[in-house]
């Protein structure tokens, strides 16, 4: 299961916080079949690198993403270790990708919600760097602001690299994907 974090509604389109959502929409466009909707998420089934995958975009706000993830994990009998979450990361420079096999929430409330709902940190993450605000007190406004044109070009390349990283991860394992894409 691949989950792209973001907030629902047109207000949040093209914001830094929705980079995971945007990436997952592109994966659905490339690989997905019919798009389904339940009370907590849009989802689509796909085959990527020979593996059947559930692509998920939670319709909850980021801070409540865990509810949707846990519901679909149970409904489709998915093991926690087979979950990949795509999210923004203000601690990474704009465009940098960081793949992890597990870990803490890193201060990200969406990841914190998923860890709480699943009762485990043992799921994979693809973090896409969106940079950080000059003033740390502006953190919320920064991630919820529209992506400037010059950053959008860089982030679109990062989304494409993230999709390739997922393909490699599913085909050859997380280590190969981390070795190739971490630090790019």
Image (cartoon, rainbow, N blue to C red):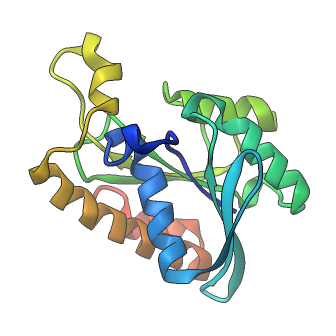
Residue that appears at 28% across and 52% down: 96
Residue that appears at 44% across and 70% down: 26
Whether residue 160 is visible here, answered yes or no, is yes
Give how far across and how far down residue 19 sits, in percent: 39, 50
Q: Nearer the viewer, residue 161 or 16?
A: 16
Whether residue 176 is visible here, answered yes or no, is no
Give how far across and how far down residue 34 sits, in percent: 67, 78
Give how far across and how far down residue 35 sits, in percent: 65, 70
Q: Quadrant of the C terminus?
A: bottom left
Q: Of all residues shown, which one is farthest toward the left?
A: 150
Query: Does 58 sit above or below residue 115?
Result: below
Q: Nearer the viewer, residue 39 or 101?
A: 39
Q: Of all residues shown, which one is farthest toward the top?
A: 137
Query: Does 172 sit above or below residue 56?
Result: below
Residue 110 horizontal side relative to residue 47, left or right: left
Residue that appears at 60% across and 53% down: 101
Q: Nearer the viewer, residue 113 or 18?
A: 18
Where is residue 153, by image quadrant? bottom left
Where is residue 163, by image quadrant? bottom left
Q: Quadrant of the N terminus?
A: bottom right
Residue 178 horizontal side relative to residue 151, left or right: right
- Counting labels gives 0
Query: Does 41 sit above or below residue 103?
Result: below
Residue that appears at 73% across and 61% down: 82
Q: Of all residues shown, which one is farthest toward the bottom?
A: 50
Residue 144 horizontal side relative to residue 77, left or right: left
């Amino acid at each position: 299961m691949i989950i792209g974090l973001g907030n629902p509604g047109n207000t949040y389109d093209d914001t830094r916080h929705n980079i995971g959502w945007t990436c997952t929409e592109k994966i659905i466009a490339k690989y997905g079949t019919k798009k389904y909707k339940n009370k907590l998420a849009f989802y689509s089934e796909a085959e990527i690198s020979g593996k059947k995958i559930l692509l998920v975009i939670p319709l909850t706000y980021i801070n409540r993403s865990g509810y949707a993830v846990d519901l679909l994990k149970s409904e489709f009998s998915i093991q926690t270790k087979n979950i990949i979450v795509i999210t923004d990361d203000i601690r990474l420079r704009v465009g940098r990708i960081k793949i992890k096999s597990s870990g803490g929430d890193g201060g990200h409330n969406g990841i914190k919600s998923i860890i709480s709902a699943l009762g485990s940190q043992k799921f994979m993450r693809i973090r896409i760097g969106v940079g950080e605000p000059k003033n740390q007190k502006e953190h919320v406004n920064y991630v919820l602001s529209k992506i400037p044109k010059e950053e959008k070009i860089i982030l679109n390349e990062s989304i494409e690299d993230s999709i390739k990283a997922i393909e490699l991860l599913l085909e050859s394992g997380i280590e190969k994907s981390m070795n190739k894409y971490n630090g790019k």
